[in-house]
Structure formats: C-alpha cells, structure tokens
C-alpha cells in the first residue's frame, strides 16, 4: 500500500531526528494580529510600532529560509500572529515556494479575500490550517473581541475552498466556546474538514499575549470535554491537541533509538532534534512555547545557530517526578509546558497534574493523589 503524505512526513522526521537534521520548522512571521483572543499567548495589535520595529523584514526572512533549506529544512509552517497582516507576505511566501518547501499556513482566515485566495491557489501550500473560535458572531465577540470576525472567517474559508486549496479547520477550546463543539464540528465538516481541537492553553509568553489563564478550562472541564468528544465521535476525525509539524509526533525519538544512539534529550517530540521555531525577531528556539534556550541567527548563519540549539536542548533537565509518574500516560507534560507553567523545566505543573488525575478518574474511576 502507498504511504500518504502524513506517513511520508512522519518517516522524514524520524530519520531527520536520528541525524539531527533540521527538517521541520515554524516561522512566526509576526506577533501582530487583527484579532485579540483572550487565550492568545502572542498577539500584539496590528499597528503596534514596537512590535513592527522588531519584526524581521522580507529580505531577512528569505535569507533565513535559504539557509534553513541548505541545512535540510523541508516541512515549513508559516504562522503568527496573523501572517496575512504582513504587507510583504506574498513576497516571502513566493520566495519560499520557489525554494520547494512543503508549506502549511496557519491563519484565522479573516483577511483572506477572493483575490488573495486566487493568488494562493496558483502556488498552493500543502494546506491552510484555519482556526475558528466559535459558531456565531456572539461567540467570536467573546473569544476574539471581534464579532464581525465570524463572517469574515467564513468568507475567507470559502474563498480558499473556491480555489481548491486544502483547508484544515481547528479550534482552541476555552470557557467561551467549549459548549459549541457540536456546531464547530458541523461547521468544519461543511468545509470538508475534520475539527482539530487544541485542548491546552498555555500561559502568555513574556512581553506579549493576553491573560490566557483566565479563559482556559479547568482541569476538570478539560477531562470532561475530552471524554464527551470521545463519546460523541470515537476516534473519528478528531485531532485532540494537534501538533504543528515542528512539534511533530512524539515519535521523534524512534529514529535515535533505531540508530543506536542513547536518547538523552528531555524532549520526546521533535524540538531541538529535527524541529525548530524562529520567532518574529529572528531568534531560534526549540518550539513556540519556549523563549529559552534561544539562539540568535547572526553572521555565522542558521547552520551554526542550529548546532548550538541542539546542544542547548541536550542540557535541559528532564523532570524526575514526571519520568517516574505512574499516570504520565494521561498527561501532556513536556519541557516547554513545564517551563511555561512553573518557570522550571523539571518541576511538575499543578495544572497538568490535576488534568491528568481527572482524565484517569473519568476514564477508569480511579483516583490518585
Ligand atoms: S489566537 Fe490566533 S487569531 Fe487569536 S489573537 Fe492570537 S494569533 Fe490572532
Ligand atoms: S516541547 Fe512540548 S509544546 Fe514544545 S513542541 Fe514539544 S511537545 Fe510541543
Ligand atoms: S506533570 Fe504531574 S501528572 Fe504529569 S507526568 Fe508530571 S508528575 Fe505526572
């Protein structure tokens, strides 16, 4: 049987992790967004001059793209903020397209006009992942601060579909939209997509973002929500906590194991092995949740920064309690989430522990302290 793209990408990533080749990345082209979601960990306002001043320009992004490609990059996600807010997005995207990347665009779709979709349809990415935040203008107003964003998003998705661009719909679950799962799923299906659900809202990154902790689900709600999804849908078409390519499957260690290398990394994902993130200021980090370790792509170029980042990542301590934890199969603990929740890589996070205990309780009836 022929392997599908997802399987091929997975195999590429596993082999790349074994060789430390940076095959998979997300470029965070901007921290600015036309929405202002309560749970956002990054958004600056569209006209934020300080944010604009720190963004790399198109030439710098293109240079980083070339250097990353020469080092092995193939699977590239373009994300923000909102990438279509950049006036030079077309210039950057077309340059990357000529470099031959397999590209995914993350967008809220509200700025995608028929004209922009037509342009994109001529050199389509492998898919556009569109986040939807509610099934009505009222919910959009509560979540994003922009009720009119609902209609704009729907029009944006329709424009993409009219150009035969593959759209993958996902949502981030919060206090304001968790009761709308059924409607959101129906909406996604009306566009020929399943509904991916991001079920973890992280605290804001330093210096940007709103106050996500006020709007994320409690551990009890998260476990209950997941159970209801499972009961309604079984395993079909539901992608709980979808990972971007740079995060990748938790199988990144497989390549290292199969190549006989001792796995020392605290990361069980691709971060710092074959996956990386570059933020809007041009700093290289293992993933989007982390500000450290962080390497500047200076005069020496991307390849040297990547080698430094790989070493930095191997220095990150694994959490001993998580390693020995007997409910870790119910937990989404990882170095980035521990750091963002607790300020340390190796300290268990109360929110994650409580969520794991609630999953265990709901699924098995068992309770652990
Ligand atoms: S979550 Fe996405 S759409 Fe919402 S403000 Fe942040 S970047 Fe914009
Ligand atoms: S460290 Fe955690 S959040 Fe970052 S890519 Fe890996 S699994 Fe995802
Ligand atoms: S965060 Fe808590 S529940 Fe999760 S693996 Fe670590 S100790 Fe276990």
Image: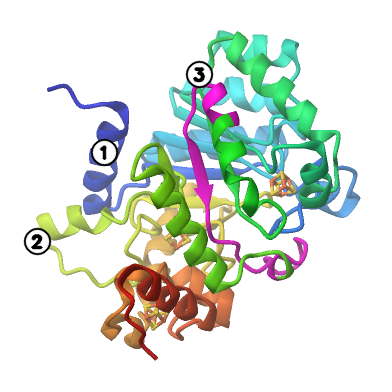
Viewer-proximal residue among 48 and 220 = 220
Residue 199 at x, y percent in the picture: 53, 57
Which quarter of the image is occupied by the N terminus? top left
Residue 118 lies left or right of residue 76; in this view the side is right
Q: Secondary structure at mark 2?
A: loop
Q: Is residue 330 above or below residue 274?
A: below
Label 2 or label 3, whichever comes before in sequence order: 3
Residue 280 lies left or right of residue 128; in this view the side is right
Most extreme residue toward the bottom is: 369
Q: Residue 12: which numbered mark, if any?
A: 1
Q: Residue 98: which numbered mark, if any?
A: 3
Task: Verify CB contact (< 8 Å) between mark 2 and mark 3.
Answer: no
Which quarter of the image is occupied by the C terminus? bottom left
Q: Residue 260: which numbered mark, if any?
A: 2
Viewer-proximal residue among 101 and 190 = 190
Ligand 1 neighbours mark 3 (CB distance < 8 Å): no
Magenta-drawn segment: 187-213
Residue 45 at x, y percent in the picture: 86, 48
Q: CA distance from mark 2 to mark 1?
A: 18 Å
Q: Secondary structure at mark 3?
A: helix
Q: Is residue 280 above or below residue 73?
A: below
Residue drawn at point x = 46 percent, y = 40 percent: 68
Residue 39 lies left or right of residue 76; in this view the side is right
């Amino acid at each position: 049987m022929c392997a599908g793209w997802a399987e091929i990408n997975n195999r590429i990533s596993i082999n790349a992790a074994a060789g430390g080749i940076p095959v998979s990345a997300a470029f965070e082209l901007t921290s600015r967004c036309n929405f202002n979601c309560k749970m956002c960990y990054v958004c600056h306002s569209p006209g934020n001059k300080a944010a604009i001043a720190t963004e790399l320009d198109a030439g710098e992004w293109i240079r980083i793209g070339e250097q990353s490609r020469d080092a092995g990059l193939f699977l590239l996600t373009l994300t923000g903020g909102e990438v279509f807010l950049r006036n030079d997005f077309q210039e950057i995207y077309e340059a990357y397209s000529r470099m031959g990347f397999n590209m995914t665009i993350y967008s809220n779709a509200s700025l995608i006009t028929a004209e922009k979709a037509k342009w994109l349809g001529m050199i389509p990415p492998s898919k556009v992942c569109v986040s939807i935040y509610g099934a009505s203008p009222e919910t959009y107003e509560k979540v994003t601060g922009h009720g009119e964003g609902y209609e704009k998003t729907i029009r944006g998705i329709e424009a993409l579909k009219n150009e035969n661009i593959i759209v993958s719909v996902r949502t981030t679950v919060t206090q304001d939209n968790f009761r709308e799962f059924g409607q959101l799923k129906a909406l996604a299906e009306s566009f020929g997509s399943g509904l991916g659900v991001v079920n973890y809202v992280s605290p804001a990154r330093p210096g940007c973002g709103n106050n996500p902790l006020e709007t994320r689900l409690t551990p009890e709600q998260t476990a209950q929500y997941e159970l209801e999804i499972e009961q309604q849908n079984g395993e079909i078409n539901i992608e709980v906590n979808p990972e971007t390519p740079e995060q990748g499957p938790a199988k990144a260690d497989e390549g290292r194991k199969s190549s006989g290398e001792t796995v020392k990394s605290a990361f069980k994902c691709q971060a710092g092995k074959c996956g990386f993130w570059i933020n809007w200021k041009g700093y290289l980090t293992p993933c989007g949740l982390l500000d450290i370790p962080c390497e500047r792509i200076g005069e020496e170029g991307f390849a040297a920064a990547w080698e430094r980042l790989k070493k930095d990542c191997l220095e990150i301590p694994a959490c001993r309690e998580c390693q020995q934890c007997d409910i870790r199969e119910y937990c989404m603990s990882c170095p980035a989430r521990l750091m963002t929740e607790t300020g340390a890589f190796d300290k268990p996070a109360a929110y994650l522990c409580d969520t794991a205990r609630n999953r265990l309780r709901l699924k098995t009836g068992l309770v652990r302290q």
